[in-house]
Image (tube, rainbow, N blue to C red):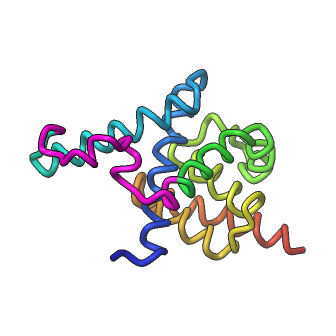
């Protein structure tokens, strides 16, 4: 059984991927993004394991793709991150903008922009301890982009967390 921190990291990875999809498709409905994401993830897992839907038992067939992939707690955590971040996007972007000196948000790479949005949401709206949110955001940026993205994200989130404390 995976430790809770590992599961939450996977949830953040999934949430970031959905937030990126929303960033690239700004007029898409969040429910559609969630639904398509879970279906796509299920298909990828089945393909990686060399299985097909007809290999499932009867119980698995009755479940939605998201229910097959993750516990209800992990799905709720993931979807809360997505819905919360996207629901507060204008406010979050307004909070990020002052930290991006000489850069507009749309000039940032999509991964960096979306990781920052997720990090700001966790720190400001969810109350995730800043060191946890920053570490998770840095790891996401390094995993989905590169080490420089991790350093960039770290700098902005760390500065934001310090200024919030002051």
Residue 37, compared with residue 9, is above or below; it is: above
Residue 85 percent location from the top left of the image: 66, 46
Residue drawn at 40 percent across, 59 percent down: 143
| Residue 96 horizontal/vertical position (percent) | 74, 49
Tell me which corner region of the image, top left, top right, bottom left or bottom right, holds residue 86: top right
Q: Quadrant of the C terminus?
A: bottom right
Q: Which residues are magenta?
A: 53-75
Q: Which residue ends up furthest to the right in the rendered image? A: 166
Evaluate whether residue 141 shows in this view.
Answer: no
Q: Nearer the viewer, residue 107 or 111?
A: 111
Give the side of residue 38 with respect to residue 109, left or right. Answer: left
Residue 73 on the magenta segment: yes
Q: Nearer the viewer, residue 83 or 75?
A: 75
| Position of 73 relative to 4 (above/below) | above
The quarter of the displayed image where residue 61 is located? top left
The picture places residue 18, in percent across and down from the top left corner, at 49, 41
In the foreground, 54 or 74: 54
User: Farthest left residue?
Assistant: 50
Q: Residue at x 9, y 47 (%)?
A: 50
Which secondary structure type mostly characterizes the magenta part of the structure? Answer: helix
Q: Residue at x 54, y 41 (%)?
A: 19
Note whether 64 is above or below 121 in the view shown.
Answer: above
Pick the quarter of the image with the N terminus: bottom left
Residue 154 visible in the picture = yes
Could you tell whether 6 is left or right of 109 in the image?
left
Q: Residue at x 50, y 46 (%)?
A: 111
């Amino acid at each position: 059984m995976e430790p809770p921190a590992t599961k939450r990291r996977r949830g953040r990875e999934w949430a970031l991927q959905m937030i990126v999809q929303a960033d690239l498709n700004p007029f898409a409905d969040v429910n559609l993004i969630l639904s398509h994401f879970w279906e796509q993830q299920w298909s990828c897992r089945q393909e990686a394991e060399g299985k097909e839907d007809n290999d499932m038992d009867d119980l698995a067939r009755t479940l939605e793709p998201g229910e097959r992939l993750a516990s209800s707690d992990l799905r709720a955590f993931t979807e809360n991150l997505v819905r919360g971040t996207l629901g507060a996007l204008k406010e979050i972007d307004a909070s990020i903008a002052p930290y991006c000196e000489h850069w507009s948000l749309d000039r940032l790479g999509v991964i960096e922009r979306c990781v920052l949005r997720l990090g700001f949401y966790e720190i400001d709206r969810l109350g995730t301890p800043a060191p946890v949110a920053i570490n998770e955001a840095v790891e996401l940026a390094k995993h989905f982009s590169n080490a420089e993205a991790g350093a960039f994200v770290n700098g902005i989130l760390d500065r934001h967390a310090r200024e919030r404390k002051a």
